[in-house]
Image: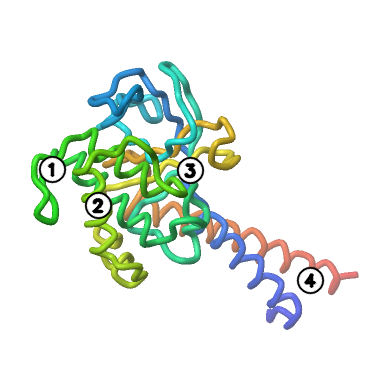
Amino acid sequence: MKIPARAFVTVLGLSVFCFGVPAFGQAVVSVDFTGGYTATFEDFGAGIYSATINGASSPGIICDDFKDEVTSGEKWNANAYQASSLTSSNIGETLFGNSIGLTGYAEVATLVSMMFGNGTSYGGINGITQSDLSSAIWDITTPGGISGLNGKAKHLVKAVEWAFNGSNSKATAYLDTLTNLWILTPDPKSGVGSGEPQEMWTERLNVPEGGSALMYLLLAGFTCFGAMFFKNRSQIRNRETV
């Protein structure tokens, strides 16, 4: 039996909704800062912070937020965004996306990758420390920059800014390669300096991805579609028998 045009449009629209919601939703993870860090900048912990994510050990987390603080033992929920998935459409969902955009996040991602990879040189700058990397990251995300930057960190900021030169296409091309990096934006996101937990970065996050995630989404979508389809057919059959 054919479905009337109006009913078909309704079913089609709702099925797109069923597919769209999980496809465009973001994974929510639980972050627990366990108190350690690998460097300091002035009186602040810097470098890679020790943490568990979803109750499991992690490679650590890196802070990109100079205006907020976390304390040892603090736990919070965060939306996890894979760096390679960032676009001009969703960058505003991150903590600083509306202020520094894709190019700013590409700059930060460059420094985060260096920190996780124990990199010590960039653009002719050698002997870079994790304190330099953290302070450079904070300078990029803080309007007007931060005070206390040493000369090496200042040169590092200029070097990564020059690398992308405000180009979204360059930023996107670079971010597309970073399938191992994830941004953990506090959920709910109240705004910079509001007292919420800090936005963090991590790598090799253990969340469903690839084939298993796709299969989940397809099964969820088909289940939703099938339920609406058969409900609609049942309603049509009932009208015909009245």
Q: Is residue 113 above or below residue 55?
A: below
Residue at coordinates 47% horizontally, 42% vertically from top-left?
A: 185
The mark closer to the camera, 4 or 1, is 1
Disc 4 or 2, which lies upstream in sequence?
Answer: 2
Disc 4 or 1, which lies upstream in sequence?
Answer: 1
Mark 4, residue position? 236
Disc 3 marks which amino acid?
A: Asn
Disc 2 marks which amino acid?
A: Thr
Disc 1 or 2, which lies upstream in sequence?
Answer: 2
Number of residues whose C-alpha sits closer than 10 Å to that of mark 3, classed few (under 14), some (14–19) or many (20 or more) = many
Mark 1, residue position? 119
Mark 4–mark 3 distance (CA, rounded to whole Å): 42 Å
Disc 3 or 2, which lies upstream in sequence?
Answer: 3
Disc 1 marks which amino acid?
A: Gly
Q: Secondary structure at mark 3?
A: strand
Asked if residue 23 can be seen in this view, the reply is: no
The mark closer to the camera, 4 or 3, is 3
Q: Which percent across, then down, holds residue 54?
A: 40, 29
Mark 4–mark 2 distance (CA, rounded to whole Å): 58 Å
Residue at coordinates 50% horizontally, 65% vertically from top-left?
A: 89
Q: Nearer the viewer, residue 134 or 204?
A: 134
Q: Which percent across, then down, holds residue 224?
A: 60, 58
Q: Secondary structure at mark 2?
A: helix
Disc 4 marks which amino acid?
A: Ile
